[in-house]
Image: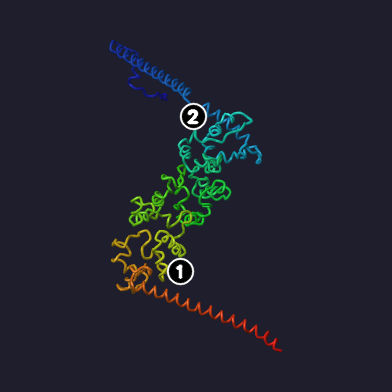
Amino acid sequence: MRPFLPLQSSASACTHQPVRGPGARAGAVAIRAGKLTMIGVTIRGLAIALLLGFAATAFAKEAPVAKEPAAAKTAAVASQKCIDCHSQAEPTDKSAAGKSVLLDPAKHAKSLHGSGKAACVDCHAGEEMRKYPHKSPKPAQCESCHAKAVKEYASTIHGKARAEGRMVAATCSDCHGTHDIKPTSDDAAKTSRANLEATCGACHGNEKIIREGKIPGGNVSALYHDSIHGRLLGGNTKAKDKVPVCTDCHGTHDMRPKRDPESAVSRANVPETCGTCHGKVKKVWAGSQHGKLRAATVLQAPGCTDCHGTHTIADPKTPKWQVGVIKECGGCHTEFIKTYRDTYHGQVTDLGFARMATCASCHGAHEVLPKSNPQSKISDQRILATCQACHPKANANFVKFQPHANKHKKESGLILYYTTKFMQLLLAGVFAFFGLHTILWLYRSLAEMKAKRARPAQESEKH
């Protein structure tokens, strides 16, 4: 059998055949030249690839590969020394300011600063903190990172109080914490919605601090807790995440006293502040007589807190509040509250019954308008419908009743005026007559008693 030989291409076969003739030699030369060219190209490609590889390797060695800066590494090492030392302190170890120097490494690591790799000396920046033992260390400073917040704090009621020497006023650490600071979005943060009442209450619910700091309003923390806002915050309804907390009304780093015109709780700004939550009510109030007066800069006109209070805001649907708010109306409308109390409505509500008509029943609550305005509930166009809300059978003659008629003035009607005078004279006459009668009767009784006592003595003398 003949052995198996691989097939060869014609070109390859030609290269292994003996070259014969001038034409064959020229072809062979061309083939050799082509091979040499291909070999040259291959060698140059390999050389370029090697050069690129060496350049990439050199660049990779020179480029920083997420290498921690030397300064940051040094600060981290220094902070770890601080943590190691303060984590071994005794709970009773205190600083010169009387504060504990014990540090919980786990809590610090989970804090905003601990997880953010802030160095201890970033906050404790005093030169005395760089040596051990620390001599008269100063409080931690926040300004190097939070310059804007610190500047705002200086103009707040807390900042001004401390500038005046009332050192019980809250500082950054009182609200945010120290080595356990967390972002406000964290439910565990002292400044989160869930914890803010307790955080503010640490001062505004502490009777000792209230006395020392001369904090106006007293224990407002307890008042807020019992208010409609406080109860909703502590409840399990959907309103829990929407109800206003301390900072929603007073602000945060821009917290100012109410006497400051720029304060969110100043008399002029209260409607805007309340309107951030109660937008629809604020719009109705703005169109009322009270709102128009405020818009005309008549600040004596009632706003939200004049009727609802501040930290004692109650549920307006409760009978107790509906009866109690009549006194608030009477605080401004002194003449009308007197005449209202003379009516059946006024006398029954004065006993605590809310089923009778109150001021808001006739005039409205936030939509109070003058009688001349057709949209008013007591206008000629709407008065009948207003009365029929309680008196379904009321007619045109029924609404002629004057709920605020003053019996002491003739302008309210001569019949009412003279009937009142007659009743007053009759009452005075009856009391005068029977008073005199009682005095004379007493005089006569005393005279008779004296005479009876004298009779036994006279009879004994005769015997």
The part of the image, by quadrant, that contains residue 362 is: bottom left
Residue 5 placed where, x, y %? Answer: 40, 23
Mark nearer the N terminus (1 vs 2) = 2
- For the residue marked with disc 1, what is the amino acid? Phe
Question: Which circle, 1 or 2, is nearer the viewer?
Answer: 1
Q: Secondary structure at mark 2?
A: loop
Q: Is residue 281 left or right of residue 229?
A: left
Residue 26 placed where, x, y %? Answer: 29, 12
Residue 24 placed where, x, y %? Answer: 30, 13
The part of the image, by quadrant, that contains residue 301 is: bottom left
Q: Nearer the viewer, residue 279 or 439?
A: 439
Q: Secondary structure at mark 1?
A: loop
The answer to whether residue 99 is above or below residue 240 is above
The residue sitting at 39% across, 73% down in the picture is 421
Label placed on residue 66: 2
Q: Which residue is mark 1?
A: 353
- For the residue marked with disc 2, what is the amino acid? Ala
